[in-house]
Image (tube, grey):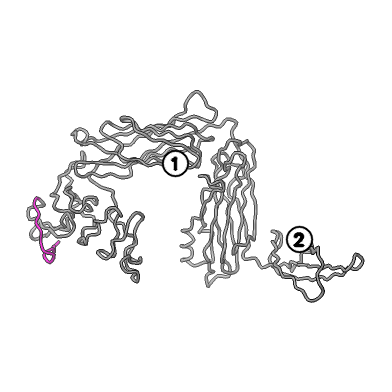
Amino acid sequence: MSIIDDVQPVFILNFTLGIKSGMWSLTGKHRMTIKDDVSPGSLVRCVMTFLSSSSPYNVTSRTLTSNYQVVPHAEVTVENRSALTQPIMGIFSTYVTLNSGRDLIGSTVECFTPPEMSSKEVRLTVQLISVIINSTFGVTSNTLEMLDSLTGSKISSLSSYQNNIGILELPPVPMSNNSNQLVLTSMFSVRVEDYSQLQNGDHWPISMGVSFNDNVMWVSEVDVTIDAPEIRLPSLAVSIQQLGQCAYDSSTTATVQVVVYHSSLSTATAYNVTVNVYLPDYMLMKTQTYTEPRENSITVAQSKTVVTAEITRLTFSDPFVLKMTLNLDLSALEVLEASNRIITAETIYNDRWNNVTDLMANTAYLSVQANKICSKPVTWTNSSTCQCSHNSTLYNCGCCLRGACPCGEIRPSACSPCDEMWHCVPYKKEFEKVSFLSNNTLCDAFNRRRGGASGVSCHTILSTNPLRYLEISPRVSVITGSDIITGNLLGVANNGLAYVISQDLGVTWSSILDQDATVRF
């Protein structure tokens, strides 16, 4: 056991006025921060000296000494598994390991990278926070699953889109019964950003801290050296993909997403970015949404067959995402049967030195699919364990997704979009299931959810190249099965409230009683 003999005055309290004679008490709280080089088991001595005087020549003193044994919550070690010199857009990862002989309670690990205050920009942005499961020991499998799902939180001290603070608040982590040591490793990854005053050879600090029960117990700092080229240029990339499609009532829509981002070759912020999406003349943008980070200006508009987005600047932390819903006019046979329906996206931009020649990313292409499949949600209910709106004493009602409202007493276990509460009618249970028959007949979700609409829900696929469909009667929304003896088809009516039967392979349908809606497969 060692004793650290380093007495330093850390707190002085002066009474300038005289204190009356008699009994008096002084109450206060003193908190000490233990240095990194103080090992567990060491004694830390606290010395308090009281001085009093009745005259300049009569001074009395009293000294109290207390010894405290250092019993840290956990031993903390930091390992840098990335090179200490990083290029622009380079990823630097720091691993923080807590090694404890008891349960971890109230533990928090934090990462902080100071921003550059004159330009109000973040130099190292926090990208990823996680617990490294294969480097965590002495806990149960259930605890490992819980830790594996932790992602931490990322915050910007500048209130911008660039996060420079990472916080991993650990839940109570009990040590398993058959272990005498608990080891937990977390990882924080930061990325080197381009900013206006960057210089080659800069040293940028990363501070790591560990606290227990809101008391900071350990702090460390790592410097990252920046390897920046003499000439820095942005390098953007553009991608385009289809997110969804839907065809109903002679109308076809497709949801398309365009993303513009910095490639791995980029070394500078891009300015005056223009994104052009070229559509065929049978496509029209119906709606659009896009990301609009703070401290930026973005406009999106369509002129004839070109959708154009104008972006003032694009940093590494700031990809641009444009999501569009397109209306497709498939009335022309050559468009309906086309093997490809191509849309194109391009990006033009400048660097910070305002070169007279624009820079341009590689063009992206997408062949839009237009099948009779819809991507609208079939259900808006997570589970049936929420408090009931019609009876606050019950907790067996539907838990609604964002934008949905509980159906109430009419269908306690269900939710519906708040502006489409007609979905709450008491449907037949099969109405909310996806319907397939013989692998070539399907009933899509959108039309099954449209209540009394006249649109066709079920289609038989006649060929896949080119795609050809045979529409089945609009009176049926879901085909529940085929009777192997009679060949009759059974299903649910298009309003979801009754069962129907077809005795001519789906050409005509008629209503039947619930007790007759059985099928022999």
* 312 left or right of 330 in image: right
Magenta includes 509?
yes
Location of residue 468 in the rendering, given as x and y in whole percent from the top left corner: 18, 41
Q: Which residue is mark 1?
A: 292
**Which quarter of the rendering shows the C terminus?**
bottom left
Q: Which mark is residue 94?
A: none
Q: Earlier in the sequence, mark 1 or mark 2?
A: 2
Magenta includes 206?
no
- Amino acid at pointer 2: Val
Classed neighbour count for the residue bearing mark 1: other residues with Cα under 10 Å, few (<14), some (14–19), many (≥20): some
**Which quarter of the rendering shows the N terminus?**
bottom right
Nearest to the observer: residue 211 or residue 104 = 211
Location of residue 205 in the rendering, given as x and y in whole percent from the top left corner: 63, 46
Which is the main secondary structure of the residues drawn in magenta? loop
Point 54% across, 69% down: residue: 175
Location of residue 174 in the rendering, given as x and y in whole percent from the top left corner: 53, 68
Total labels: the figure holds: 2
Q: Which residue is mark 2?
A: 10
Q: Can residue 11 be seen in the rendering of this structure? A: yes
- Amino acid at pointer 1: Glu
Q: Which residues are magenta?
A: 507-521
Q: Can residue 437 be seen in the rendering of this structure? A: no
491, above or below 178, in the image: above
Point 20% across, 51% down: residue: 443
